[in-house]
Image: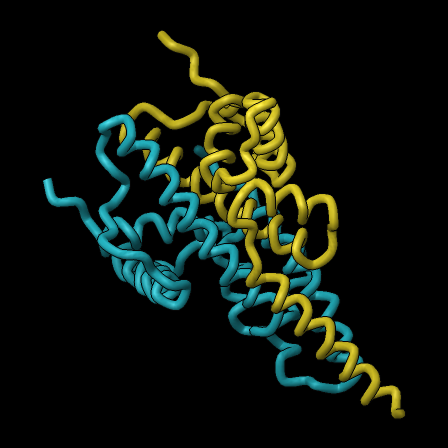
Amino acid sequence: MKKSTLGFLLSAVFLASSTLASSWMPSNIKEYKQSKKAGGTNWKAAIVYIGGMGHGIEAANAYLASIHQQVTYCPPENLVMRISNYMDAIDLAIKKHEPISQDDFPVDLVLLDGLQELFPCQRK
Amino acid sequence: MDYKNCFPVSENRETKTELVGDLSMKGLVLVLILGALLYASVAEALDYKEYKTAKAIDGASWSSVRAFVNAVSEGFNVANRDLAGKSRPLLYCQPFALNVDTLLTILDSEIKTMEEITHKPLPDNMPIGVVLLSGMQDTFPCKS
């Protein structure tokens, strides 16, 4: 097989697997935990999904702040939110409610709960 | 919140659009490497420059962007549910679920609107989440 043909096939496989991975998302905490443990393409897709959700929540929070409304959670002013912050938030929320299982809980709600737990707003 | 420095853009990505038409072995390898870089950065955040680049390249990068945009709207939805639970005004009032193609139509339309209003191209470092939220608010305003 020619090098160029092999390269093309490998590229096609890589792109196809990445595309498939991108379309997957964990619907609940059970799937989140499973994909985290297994790693691979589903976990990569979960990271994109959680990153997107986190930034959606962050944009909503920034909007509320801009119209002087009470924000949903209060991260430090100079903190640049990263995937690791969102993962920490999810893990914190899971831990907070133990031993109650949150396996059936949607990931988005647990993420928001975790962000509020991780970055609580000081009551004035 | 200042998003200005949240989404660093690699210098390497400048060349991605130019590579689209080059399907030589070298070109494919470069597209794959750049695509992988973009795939990784999409997970952290997404700005307008990355959005444009992924759209031009298509393939896996664009699939990641589509997944990211869909997830951003999920983030809005959960924020909206939280606001509703506290009897507070919603971000916007979306009457039905949207698929990712519709979200992208709203996003592209908002980009155009913002550029028309400001008479300037949308800044490359503009977070896509901010643009999409504005688009959702324009498309689905709440009746007061």
In which quadrant of the rendered image does the C terminus of chain B lie? top left
Query: What is the tally of numbered marks visible in this picture?
Result: 0
Q: Quadrant of residue A88?
A: top right
Q: Residue at x 70, y 65 (%)?
A: B34
Q: Is residue B62 left or right of residue B28?
A: left
Residue B115 seen in the figure = no
User: What is the x, y in percent for residue A44?
Assistant: 67, 54
User: What is the x, y in percent for residue B110?
Assistant: 31, 59
Q: Quadrant of residue A5?
A: bottom right
- Residue at the top extreme, as displayed: A124
| Residue B133 higher or lower than B49, as above or below | above
Q: Residue at x 47, y 28 (%)?
A: A113
Q: Residue at x 43, y 44 (%)?
A: B75
Q: Colour of chain A?
A: yellow
A91 or A56, which is in the foreground?
Answer: A91
Q: Is residue A66 left or right of residue B10?
A: left
Q: Is residue B45 left or right of residue B23?
A: left
Q: Residue at x 42, y 48 (%)?
A: B74
In which quadrant of the rendered image does the N terminus of chain B lie? top left
User: What is the x, y in percent for residue A86?
Assistant: 58, 36
B107 or B13, which is in the foreground?
Answer: B107
Q: Colour of chain B?
A: cyan
Q: Is residue A25 left or right of residue B114?
A: right
- Residue at the left extreme, as displayed: B144
| Residue B132 higher or lower than B76, as above or below | below
User: What is the x, y in percent for residue A116?
Assistant: 47, 24
B88 or B36, which is in the foreground?
Answer: B88
Residue A100 seen in the figure = yes
| Residue A70 higher or lower than B94, as above or below | above
